[in-house]
Each structure stands twice: as C-alpha cells, then as structure tokens.
Amino acid sequence: MSSDRPFFTAPEEELDTNQILYEALPLAKLVVAVGVVAFIPILLQTTLFEILGLASLFELLFTFLTQLVLAVGSGIVLLYIIVRANQLADE
C-alpha cells in the first residue's frame, strides 16, 4: 500500500490525529450551522402555537420547512464531504 494515504503518517503508518481534527472541525461547524438553521422554524412554530395559538395549517407548514432545511443541509454536507475527499485523493 502507498504511504501517501490520507490521515496516516508516512513512515510509521499511524493515524495522524492533527489532520483528522483539521478535517473534522470544518465539517462539524457545517453540521452545527445546518442544525441551527433547521432549529429556527421549530422555534417559530413553538412560539406561534404556545403564545398566539394559531391553526394547525401553520404547524404543517413549519414542519415541512424544517424537513426541507434538514434535507438540503444534509445534501450540502454530503457534497462537502465528497469534494473534500476528492481533494485529499488528488494530493
């Protein structure tokens, strides 16, 4: 096997924890950002129903919006992972 594998040190073939953290932190930030954006419709839904007592049509709308944000966010995270993996493979 080649010693130029990502996440392994060249001579010893041990895990390179610095590189793993370097790659994991931006990914974690992206996942947290998607989670925060998805939490906004849930927070609005809770606020509107607890305080204002609006109809269930809005509840369905905010649930759909939350699911949409999570689906699109998951796609963005997967695209980031694929692009970054291709970049690492080319190095």
Image (spheres, helix red, strand yellow):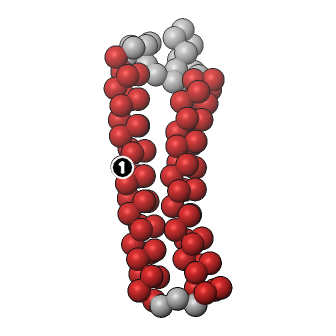
- Please give left or right for residue 40 compared with residue 59 in the image: right
Depicted 72 relative to depicted 54: above or below: above
Residue at 48% across / 91% down in the picture? 55
Q: Amino acid at mark 1?
A: Gly
Residue at 41% across / 37% down in the picture? 81
Q: Where in the figure is residue 80, as x and y percent of width and height?
A: 40, 37
- Please give left or right for residue 2 compared with residue 26 in the image: left
Q: Which residue is mark 1?
A: 75
Q: Nearer the viewer, residue 35 or 48?
A: 48
Depicted 86 relative to depicted 3: above or below: below
Taking the view exactly as shown, the residue that stands out farthest to the top is 11
Quadrant where the N terminus sits is: top left
Residue at 57% across / 72% down in the picture? 44
Depicted 55 relative to depicted 36: above or below: below
Q: Secondary structure at mark 1?
A: helix
Q: Where in the figure is residue 48, as x and y percent of width and height?
A: 58, 81
Q: Nearer the viewer, residue 63 or 23?
A: 63
Quarter residue 28 falls in: top right
- Count neighbours of disc 1 (C-alpha within 10 A) and say few if under 14, some if 14 to 19, many if 20 or more: few
Numbered marks: total: 1
Quarter residue 4 falls in: top left
